[in-house]
Amino acid sequence: MAALTLLTAATSINATTTTIGGGDKTKKAKAKKADADKESYIKAIRLYNLPDGTCTFEEGKIPNKTNMDVKTFFAQTHVDDYEKVAHAAPRMQYVVTLKGKLKFKVSNGDTFIIEPGVVLVAEDTLGKGHSWDLVKGEKWERLYIPLKDGAEDHFIKN
């Protein structure tokens, strides 16, 4: 009888293990899907104007493998004089940081960090705009990718 009780207990433990294992598989599948979703997008921060002309930002993403309606692109490592003070974006554009880490500041004093791997979607073309300081690295290496007039920015807010 003791052997039967031990066998029943072992079967229950085995059944519990199977259930837990199944739960782990479900968790792993959900985690894998979340990772795949993350890989389907690139993190982005969008600068934009409020109705009063001030500048603010929002966090979001841009989908991978999306054709962008852009004019051209160019690289830049130097800092133009107008970039050293608060300024509006000269045009709607993506700014892709290749090297450097920057702290951006918008009209109300809120800040965010841009570093390689995060696309800046600059749409604050009016008013005082934004300012930035280099917080890591010796220079800011970046690509500017201006959008064509009226083009979709493909930004998706979080």
Image: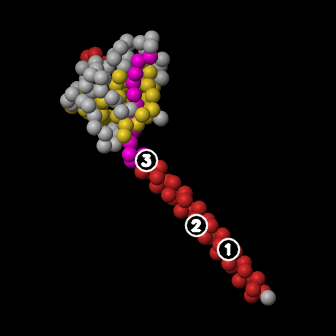
Element on which disc 1 rests: helix
Query: Between residues 59 and 147, which one lies in front from this camera angle?
Result: 147
* Residue depth check, mark 3 versus mark 1: number of the one nearer the observer: 3
Label 2 sits on what residue type? Gly
Q: Earlier in the sequence, mark 2 or mark 1?
A: 1
Residue density around tag 1, few if under 14, some if 14–19, many if 20 or more, within 10 Å: few
Instruction: Report the side of 8 relative to 61 (left or right).
Output: right
Measure how far apart labels 2 and 1 are at the Cα level.
12 Å
Q: In the rendered structure, which amino acid carries the disc numbered 1?
A: Ile
Main SS type for the magenta part? Answer: strand
The residue carrying mark 2 is 21
Cα distance, mark 3 to mark 1?
A: 36 Å
Residue 89 image point, x, y percent: 32, 20
**Camera sees residue 10:** yes
Ranked by sequence position, the earlier of labels 3 and 1 is 1
What span is in magenta? 37-50
Is residue 38 one of those drawn in magenta?
yes
Percent across and percent down for residue 142 are: 26, 32
Which of marks 2 and 3 precedes in the sequence?
A: 2
Could you tell me if the residues under marks 3 and 2 are in contact, i.e. CB atoms within 8 Å? no
* Residue denoted by label 3: 37
SS class of the residue under badge 3?
helix
Q: Is residue 49 above or below residue 100?
A: above
Q: Which residue is mark 1?
A: 13
- The residue depicted at 28 percent of the width and 18 percent of the height is 90
Residue type pointed to by label 3 = Asp
Instruction: Depth check: give the residue in front, 140 or 145.
Output: 145
| Residue shown at 43% from the left, 47% from the top | 37
Residue 105, position as x, y percentages in the image: 42, 22
Question: Which colouring convention does the figure follow?
Answer: secondary structure
Q: Is residue 121 magenta?
A: no
